[in-house]
Amino acid sequence: MSEIIKKIAESPASETLYLAFELGNTEWKLGFSIGLGQAARQRKVQAGDLVGLEQEIRRAKERFKVAESTRVVSCYEAGRDGFWLHRYLTSLGVENRVVDSASIEVNRRAKRAKTDSLDVQKLLMMLIRYDHGEQKVWSVVHVPSIEAEDSRHLHRQLRVFKGDRTRHSNRIKGMLVGQGVRLPVEADFLERIEQVRLWDGRSLPPGLRARLHRDAERAGYQFVTQQVQELEAERRELLRSSTEPSVTQVRQLLQLRGLGENSAWLFVMEFFSWREFRTRRQVGGLAGLTPTPYQSSEQSREQGIDKAGNSPIRSMAIEIAWGWLRHQPESDLSLWFQRRFGQGSKRLRKIGIVALARKLLIALWRYLAYGEMPTGAQLKPA
């Protein structure tokens, strides 16, 4: 590492202005430099002040005595501000990088001092190293297009509403179980609770009954259920009439047995439609389904999957892998699983299903990208 930094410091100065952001809720910390060995110029602007940002970039060029046309390279950590700032910087001609904050190296020796000033200096140094060819200094986030980012709202909101519905349902069931009553939360729930009787024949206490009405009708459950139904209807209409390439990919996945609307839509909109995979390792790595070996001297063991990728995709892939065994029992993937793990223990089968999920995700990518059907897989009836 020190040799790389030394080579960078000794290399001829290039006309490049480096800019690192530390984004806050009320203000942004900016750090400027033109290379290693240069004291960072640190400034603050109000959060979202684009005019002030452009002024600070011009002043930094004047301070470091570089030309107005000097190449500007910047970076900031992925977070709540999303990608709009990246798009704005790109429109100015700035070469920006959005960085995965979990991939930034830190000192593990002792307690770590953390301030915005130290963070900006750290980002600046790593940005310079990255720009000089040290590609593994951190992980850069792939920025989706505006259209691809917008297409993810439907299934993400649907997932949130379904989670809210489950929480409302569990809370209502918990209040009833506290009185010895077990009643499913269904469409006619409000009518049925009026007929419920406790162990001694009495009706539900008025306070509990009023709270159940509020939770079920006005405060949450029925409203959230209605929202879920409307979003699912909107998704079905898109599947029926949309001509977007991403929706066409969803229809293509839906032809396979074992895949439904939820899984096909998630796989395409969150994963396959806007990412350009070149190798199967990229598919497995982005889903967090890659192994994490540990080898030191004579010690060698496996630590399991790294779980560093898209967690909804990983969860869905494992769920679909179990369904694949049931709906596609004659496929090569299912036969491979039965040979390797079918006769093993419960723990071994759980390990095997993760391996199957990775293989299945790669097979689905090849099916969408190259039209290669998973070997032995069957399509749904027309």
Image (cartoon, rainbow, N blue to C red):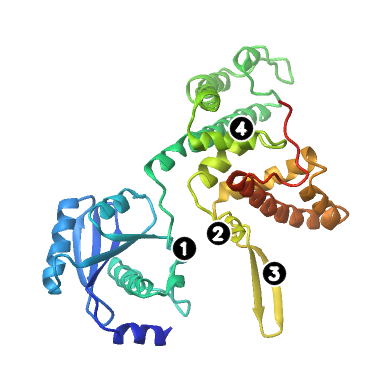
- Residue displayed at 45% across by 64% down: 139
Q: Place residue 299 in its image quadrant.
A: bottom right
Tag 2: amino acid: Ala
One can see residue 164 in this view: yes
Q: Nearer the viewer, mark 4 or mark 2?
A: 4
Q: Earlier in the sequence, mark 4 or mark 1?
A: 1
The answer to whether marks 4 and 3 mark residues whose Cβ atoms lie closer than 8 Å is: no
Residue 279 location (% of width, % of height)? 58, 59
For residue 186, above or below residue 98: above
- Quadrant location, the C terminus: top right
Q: Name the residue under label 4.
A: 261
Which residue type does callout 4 highlight? Glu
Q: Residue at x 76, y 37 (%)?
A: 378
**Residue 102, disc:** 1
Q: In which quarter of the image is residue 36?
A: bottom left
* Residue 5 image label: none
Lateral position of residue 138 relative to residue 351, left or right: left
